Image (spheres, rainbow, N blue to C red):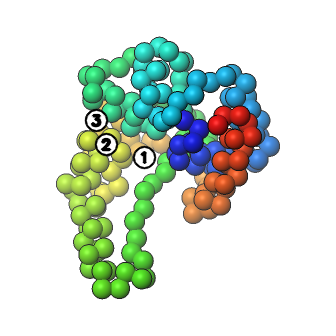
């Protein structure tokens, strides 16, 4: 799904790592293969599982969600080569704005809850995300987070490249 935020973040990472020309060439090569368009990632995984497409570029948890629904799948997750933009690990973040004022205690309570064992266990077992709190195990069978080799880039700068990533995806004819 070329308009998916995770896909666009991956393209932004590719621009940061490989430059705009190489990213454009990669997107144009993808477009030249006339990929089947999908509105979001879950139907991509279902189509791959049904053998309708050879592969899809999606987040790992979509396949795990399908496996939870069906019990088993023929499709498998593949983790890309170390340092490749496709191996980007995108952590979620939360913070408290200076403008929170008298709501700072409420915001702090929310953060503490989200980092609690019960919330992190929910994310791991129900949404199949990697837990971020120490002591909470990832979903059984999921490649350990410390075995993933995300590319060496400054994630705080990723948003600087999102608009250009969106433009390149559109220019390549994927949208």
Percent x, y of residue 16: 69, 52
Q: Classify 110 as above or below 5.
A: below
Question: Seen from this angle, which residue lies furthest top?
Answer: 51
Which tag, 2 or 3, sits closer to the chain's start? Answer: 2
Residue 89 vs residue 127, the one in the foreground: 127
Residue 120, horizontal then vertical, whole percent: 27, 53
Q: Which numbered disc covers residue 127?
A: 2
Lower sequence index among marks 1 and 3: 3
How many residues crowd mark 1 within 10 Å: few (<14), some (14–19), many (20+)? few
Query: At 74% from the left edge and 32% from the top edge, which residue is drawn?
Result: 28
Quick check: can you spot residue 26?
Answer: no
Instruction: Please tell me whether mark 2 or mark 3 is closer to you in this view.
Output: 2
Ranked by sequence position, the earlier of labels 1 and 2 is 2
Q: Which residue is the site of mark 1?
A: 146
Lateral position of residue 74 relative to residue 69, left or right: right
Q: Residue at x 71, y 47 (%)?
A: 167
Identify the residue under disc 3.
140
Residue 40: horizontal and vertical position, in percent? Answer: 48, 36
Quarter of the image containing the N terminus?
top right
């Amino acid at each position: 799904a070329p308009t998916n935020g995770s896909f666009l973040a991956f393209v932004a990472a590719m621009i940061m790592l490989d430059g705009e020309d190489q990213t454009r060439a990669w997107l144009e090569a993808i477009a030249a293969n006339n990929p089947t368009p999908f509105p979001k990632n879950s139907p991509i995984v279902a189509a791959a599982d049904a053998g309708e497409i050879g592969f899809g570029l999606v987040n790992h948890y979509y396949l795990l969600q399908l496996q939870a629904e069906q019990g088993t799948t023929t499709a498998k997750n593949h983790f890309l080569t170390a340092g490749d933009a496709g191996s980007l690990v995108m952590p979620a973040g939360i913070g408290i704005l200076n403008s929170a004022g008298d709501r700072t205690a409420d915001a702090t309570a929310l953060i503490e809850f989200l980092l609690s064992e019960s919330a992190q266990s929910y994310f791991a077992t129900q949404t199949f995300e990697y837990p971020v709190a120490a002591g909470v195990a990832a979903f059984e069978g999921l490649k350990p987070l410390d075995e993933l080799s995300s590319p060496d880039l400054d994630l705080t700068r990723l948003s600087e490249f999102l608009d250009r990533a969106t433009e390149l995806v559109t220019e390549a004819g994927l949208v």
